[in-house]
Image (cartoon, helix red, strand yellow):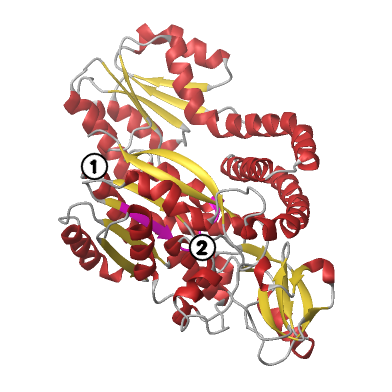
């Protein structure tokens, strides 16, 4: 099938002087119509569809800006390149304000014009082709990296690269190769789960050097930022690495971004991983200091009520002094102005830590299983990324971060854990006292029908838990499994298959970003 030549309309009163430019474009396969005034240009645009308009700004009769104004009323999405002899900021600003694709200053060379035209009309196809070529060239190396992964650094680096490929290929529209990336991630999950099952208990016991964990974040990354100026400590609950990747470009104009990866502790759930962030401790240590806290449940409401106290205690333990802390947990953007006002007030205190927890992503993830509409809107990883980015652009979180950048405040931005799209049910046999989470459970006489689908232990020290009742078993789901009961098999399968869940062992849940945001000079 012959590709239709892209149509270009060039409107310029000195079009005869631009014959070399026109020939150059035509030789590259573009159909170019040339016209000498704005009125005739608009008439042609009303008769024929054009892929791009090259518009001279200074012409007798209607100026280029006047033509653009009319054109925007008649065709909001027309792609226009403004070409002008004027270097005045006002002219350029008005053209950009009317959403031109590019602004060129005469004299222009044929090659310069071709470069702009190619970027606008062919850029998407070129990026798609280049992304496909780059991934194909890298694919065999990725297979070897997966086979050779043995350390936390190698697993994290491979997962990070696969996430970047998934985001890049998706952005380039190369949907055909996304399945290849997804297959590599599936294989990585299996290797990662077996490796975590072997090494995680050693990290918790201090028997083996491990990665940066939830319990290390404040000590290693927040405390070095403390000083006379306020510092932000921001936690976006349940943020996957790929979700961070699509909101990072929105922050780049405001901050210099220094990114690391850390591993969430197990279970990768709010009552444990987020408490570990704020306390710097495993559950056994928190329970030792707060005996009433540990109630052998997984209820977030009861287990996450002391985050501000835990952070203050950890900062005092690490610095030897009382560090002022302003703590807020934000569930909705409806109170944006009140939140920003309280934050501004807190910033008046010298050396304060502004600790903010935003729960939108976690609420969306949980609510998705209960809402057919949300399930459809966020039906897969790509859709979840898009929804997260759309929310972030208009969120209280973004407003607070932009204000922090404008005032020159450093930000440590992270999450407690990620989530995984669960596809496979695995049956568990449990008594009524077992915890309810679909990715981890603990209770008496607890076992999984398929032992390969879980990390199972009877020793609470493997997870850094306080002592449990005699005979307690701890199960943590591997890969993309979720727990179902034999008595509710079909109900749970229908309700939770294709749900984003967390609490288990997978790269998506455990390997998450922690970012130092340094304000850019104003």
Q: Please provide the residue range marked out in magenta.
A: 232-242
Q: Residues within 10 Å of mark 1 (few under 14, many from 20)?
A: some
Secondary element at image label 1: loop
Q: Residue at x 55, y 77 (%)?
A: 371
Q: Residue at x 78, y 56 (%)?
A: 194
Relative placement, left or right, of 392 versus 419 is left
Q: Is 240 colored magenta in this rendering?
A: yes
Q: Position of residue 382 (x, y in %)?
A: 58, 54
Relative placement, left or right, of 401 versus 349 is right
Look at the picture and state if 328 lies above or below 168. below
Instruction: Report the Cα–Cα distance between label 2 and label 1.
Output: 27 Å
User: Is residue 183 in sight in this rendering?
Assistant: yes
Q: Residue furthest front?
A: 320
Q: Position of residue 379 (x, y in %)?
A: 61, 64
Q: Are marks 2 and 1 in contact (CB under 8 Å)?
A: no
- In which quadrant of the rendered view does residue 318 lie? bottom left
Residue assigned mark 1: 408
Q: Is 148 colored magenta in this rendering?
A: no
Quadrant placement of the C terminus: top left
Secondary element at image label 2: loop
- In which quadrant of the rendered view does residue 256 lie? top left
Nearest the viewer among 346 and 6 is: 346
Look at the picture and state if 273 lies above or below 29. below
Nearest the viewer among 9 and 129 is: 129
Mark drawn on residue 199: none
Mark drawn on residue 238: 2
Look at the picture and state if 443 lies above or below 278. below
Q: Position of residue 124 (x, y in %)?
A: 55, 34
């Amino acid at each position: 099938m012959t590709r239709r030549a892209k149509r270009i309309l060039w409107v310029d009163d000195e079009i005869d002087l631009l014959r070399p430019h026109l020939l150059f474009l035509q030789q590259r396969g573009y159909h170019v119509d040339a016209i000498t005034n704005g009125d005739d240009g608009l008439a042609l645009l009303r008769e024929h569809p054009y892929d791009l308009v090259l518009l001279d700004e200074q012409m007798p009769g209607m100026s280029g800006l006047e033509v653009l104004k009319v054109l925007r009323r008649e065709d909001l999405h027309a792609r226009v390149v403004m070409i002008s002899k004027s270097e005045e900021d006002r002219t350029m600003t008005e053209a950009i304000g009317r959403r031109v694709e590019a602004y060129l200053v005469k004299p222009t060379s044929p090659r310069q014009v071709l470069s702009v035209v190619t970027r606008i009309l062919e850029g998407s196809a070129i990026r798609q082709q280049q992304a496909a070529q780059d991934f194909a060239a890298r694919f065999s190396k990725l297979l070897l990296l997966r086979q050779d992964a043995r350390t936390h650094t190698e697993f994290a680096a491979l997962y990070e690269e696969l996430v970047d490929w998934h985001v890049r290929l998706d952005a380039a529209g190369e949907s055909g190769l996304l399945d290849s990336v997804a297959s590599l991630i599936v294989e990585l999950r299996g290797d990662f789960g077996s490796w975590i099952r072997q090494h995680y208990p050693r990290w918790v016991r201090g028997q083996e050097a491990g990665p940066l964990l939830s319990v290390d974040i404040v000590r290693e990354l927040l405390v070095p930022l403390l000083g006379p100026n306020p510092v932000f400590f921001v936690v976006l609950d349940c943020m996957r690495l790929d979700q961070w990747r699509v909101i990072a470009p929105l922050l780049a104009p405001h901050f210099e971004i220094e990114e690391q990866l850390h591993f969430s502790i197990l279970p990768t759930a709010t009552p444990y991983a987020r408490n570990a962030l704020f306390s710097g401790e495993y559950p056994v240590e928190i329970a030792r200091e707060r005996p009433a806290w540990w109630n052998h449940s997984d209820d977030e409401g009861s287990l996450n009520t002391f985050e501000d106290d835990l952070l203050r205690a950890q900062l005092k333990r690490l610095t030897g002094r009382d560090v002022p802390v302003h703590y807020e947990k934000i569930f909705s953007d409806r109170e944006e102005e009140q939140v920003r006002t309280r934050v501004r007030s807190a910033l008046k205190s010298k050396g304060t830590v502004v600790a903010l927890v935003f729960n939108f992503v976690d609420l969306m993830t949980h609510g998705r299983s209960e809402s057919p509409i949300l399930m459809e809107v966020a039906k897969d990883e790509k859709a979840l990324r898009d929804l997260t980015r759309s929310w972030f652009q208009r969120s209280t979180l973004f407003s607070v971060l932009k204000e922090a950048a404008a005032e020159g405040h450093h930000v440590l931005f992270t999450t407690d854990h990620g989530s995984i799209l669960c596809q496979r049910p695995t049956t568990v046999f449990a008594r009524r006292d077992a915890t309810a989470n679909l990715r981890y459970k603990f209770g008496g006489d607890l076992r999984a029908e398929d032992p390969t689908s879980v990390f199972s232990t009877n020793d609470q020290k493997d997870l850094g838990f306080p002592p449990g009742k005699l005979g307690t078993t701890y199960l943590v789901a591997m890969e993309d499994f979720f727990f179902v009961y034999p008595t509710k098999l079909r109900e749970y399968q229908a309700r939770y298959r294709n749900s984003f869940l967390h609490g288990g062992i997978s790269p998506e849940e455990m390997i998450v970003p922690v970012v130092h945001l340094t304000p850019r000079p104003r």
